[in-house]
Image (spheres, grey):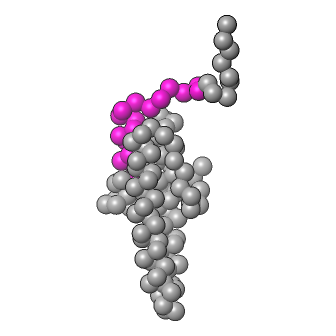
């Protein structure tokens, strides 16, 4: 008889198509809704799906982190480094949100590499 390695066994089923879609929306809608989109997804679905909850929390934390980074950049505009910093933060956020959206659509977890985790 073959034994199963307990580290390979998962206790949660893979996310459904609807769960993947809602998790994807928690990331992609930040382009039009800022931090409001993942906040709404988190509040609406936090008790229904751990997969959606994880993605919505990550997206919300990242959006709050971006707000703080842009505020710091705005302050640094007076010494001209803020313009460069705003550009870097903007391009970086675009790339990271797209990566998170792809991972959510694949049904995989994603953690932003540069993220202050206010909501855990």
Between 117 and 97, the one nearer to me in the picture: 97
Q: Give the total of numbered labels.
A: 0
Rendered view: 42 above or below 18: below
* Residue 33 locus on image (x, y percent): 34, 59
- Outermost residue toward the left in this view: 32
**Residue at figure coordinates x 47%, y 71% from the top left:** 89
Residue 26 within the segment the image draws in magenta: yes
**Residue at figure coordinates x 37%, y 58% from the top left:** 30
- Outermost residue toward the bottom in this view: 79
- Is residue 38 visible in the rendered image? The answer is no
Quadrant for the N terminus, please. Answer: top right
Position of 94 compared to 110: left or right? left
* Residue 16 locus on image (x, y percent): 40, 30
Stretch of the chain drawn in magenta: 10-27
Residue 117 within the segment the image draws in magenta: no
* Residue 35 locus on image (x, y percent): 42, 59
- Is residue 100 visible in the rendered image? The answer is yes
**Residue at figure coordinates x 52%, y 71% from the top left:** 68
Rendered view: 120 above or below 67: above
């Amino acid at each position: 008889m073959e034994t199963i390695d307990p580290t390979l066994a998962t206790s949660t089923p893979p996310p459904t198509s609807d769960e993947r879609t809602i998790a994807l929306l928690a990331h992609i809608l930040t382009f039009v809704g800022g931090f409001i989109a993942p906040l709404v997804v988190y509040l609406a679905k936090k008790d229904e799906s751990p997969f959606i909850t994880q993605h919505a929390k990550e997206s919300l934390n990242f959006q709050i982190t971006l707000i703080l980074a842009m505020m710091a950049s705005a302050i640094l505009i007076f010494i001209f480094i803020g313009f460069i910093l705003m550009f870097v933060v903007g391009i970086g956020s675009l790339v990271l949100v797209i990566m998170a959206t792809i991972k959510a659509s694949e049904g995989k977890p994603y953690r932003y590499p540069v993220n202050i985790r206010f909501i855990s």
